[in-house]
Image (cartoon, rainbow, N blue to C red):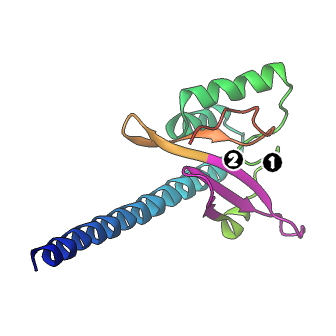
């Protein structure tokens, strides 16, 4: 009888712990998706402001949402590899309609990777950008950006 009681108690504790962790992971995933959405909303809206393009404003948004290591590496690519487009949108021009058509999905096989997809209204295919998000100084930050395969940063799960 005692054996059965211990068995049920241990089973209950394990199932409770697992459901708690799954709930926490789902909440974290929703939080990260909201973080990515906030970044792209702020970023694309800033890039579409009428008048003069404010590169300093774009850089401030990048600093707010990205790790310094990622920004340093993007700067390296601009200087050394002649990166001539914005790696966060994989284009030179910002299109406000992207926000209406943007989707953000967790990459199932990777712990901290997300696919951000959007398309021009006239195109059939979506542009998909894989980004990595992790906690950095107790805040979510973009630390990985897939531009030239693994050249932007080394991805570590």
The image quarter in which residue 68 lies? top right
Tag 2 near tag 1, CB within 8 Å: yes
Q: Position of residue 108 (x, y in %)?
A: 61, 61
Q: Earlier in the sequence, mark 2 or mark 1?
A: 2
Q: Position of residue 28 (x, y in %)?
A: 42, 58
**Horizontal arrangement in the rendering, residue 85 relative to residue 4 (left or right):** right
Distance from the alpha carbon under mark 2 to that under mark 1: 8 Å
Which residue is pictured at 67% across the width and 57% down the height? 115
Q: Position of residue 154 (x, y in %)?
A: 66, 32
| Residue, disc 2 | 47
Instruction: Answer whether residue 25 is magenta in the image.
Output: no
Which residue is pictured at 63% across the width and 39% down the height? 144
Secondary structure type for disc 1: loop
The numbered dot on residue 115 is none
- What is the span of residues highlighted in magenta in the rendered image? 104-131
Quarter of the figure with the C terminus:
top right
Classed neighbour count for the residue bearing mark 1: other residues with Cα under 10 Å, few (<14), some (14–19), many (≥20) = few
The image quarter in which residue 85 lies? top right
Q: Position of residue 35 (x, y in %)?
A: 50, 54
């Amino acid at each position: 009888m005692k054996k059965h009681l211990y068995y049920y108690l241990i089973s209950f504790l394990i199932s409770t712990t697992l459901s708690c962790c799954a709930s926490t992971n789902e909440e974290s995933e929703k939080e990260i998706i909201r973080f990515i959405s906030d970044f792209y909303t702020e970023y694309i809206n800033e890039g579409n402001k009428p008048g003069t393009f404010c590169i300093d404003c774009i850089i401030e948004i990048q600093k707010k949402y990205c790790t310094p290591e990622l920004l340093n590496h993007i700067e390296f690519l601009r200087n050394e590899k002649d990166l001539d487009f914005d790696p966060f949108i994989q284009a030179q021009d910002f299109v406000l309609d992207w926000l209406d058509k943007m989707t953000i999905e967790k990459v199932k096989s990777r712990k901290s990777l997300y696919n951000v997809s959007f398309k021009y209204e006239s195109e059939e295919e979506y542009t998909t950008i894989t980004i990595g998000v992790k906690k950095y100084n107790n805040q979510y930050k973009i630390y990985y950006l897939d531009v030239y395969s693994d050249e932007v940063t080394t991805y570590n799960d």
